Image (tube, rainbow, N blue to C red):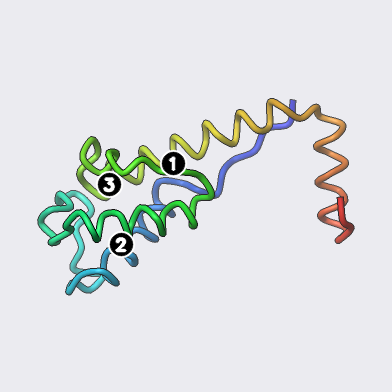
Amino acid sequence: MITSTSTLTAEAIQEWMVAQLAAQTDYEPDEIDPTVTFDNFGLDSAKAMALMAEAEKFLGFEVSPTLLWHYPTLETFSARLAEEAADIESQLLAQVDDATLAKMLAEVEAGDEP
């Protein structure tokens, strides 16, 4: 079976989230400590929903808004999202046999349409 390492690491997600949180608050990215809870940044429910909508676009999958309360820091939230991204990627890869996936990857690399 072909496996893949997701580019959606916890670090990459956290970096993106810091930029998004800075855009929605009065904080500069370098002022945002990923170990501090979201409520310390003035993230109200409306801003949280906007952040979730942007996260879904960035990640490519639906994100439950309740995750912000279960994982209340950028550090823990980003780690959880990276786990979900890896799970989804694994599930998708498991649905495609090796030969088909190899052919699709070769077509992409050659610039052909699948």
Task: Choose the circle earlier in sequence order: 1 or 3.
Answer: 3
Please name the residue shown 27% across and 63% down the image.
21
Q: Provide the secondary structure element on which disc 2 rests.
A: helix
Classify mark 3: residues with Cα within 10 Å, few (<14), some (14-19) or many (20+). Answer: many
Q: Provide the secondary structure element on which disc 1 rests.
A: helix
Please name the residue shown 80% across and 27% down the image.
97
Q: Which residue is mark 1?
A: 82
Which amino acid lies under the numbered mark 3 shown in the image of this protein? Glu
Task: Choose the circle earlier in sequence order: 3 or 2.
Answer: 2
Which amino acid lies under the numbered mark 2 shown in the image of this protein? Val
- In this rendering, position of residue 102 left or right of residue 54: right
Q: Position of residue 79 (x, y in %)?
A: 36, 41
Classify mark 1: residues with Cα within 10 Å, few (<14), some (14-19) or many (20+). Answer: many
Res. 18 mark: 2
Q: Provide the secondary structure element on which disc 3 rests.
A: helix
Mark-to-mark CA distance, 3 and 2: 10 Å
Q: Position of residue 26 (x, y in %)?
A: 17, 74
Task: Choose the circle earlier in sequence order: 1 or 2.
Answer: 2
Classify mark 2: residues with Cα within 10 Å, few (<14), some (14-19) or many (20+). Answer: many
Corner quadrant of residue 40: bottom left
Query: Which residue is more in the foreground, 72 or 5?
Result: 72
Cβ–Cβ under 8 Å for marks 1 and 3: no
Mark-to-mark CA distance, 1 and 3: 11 Å
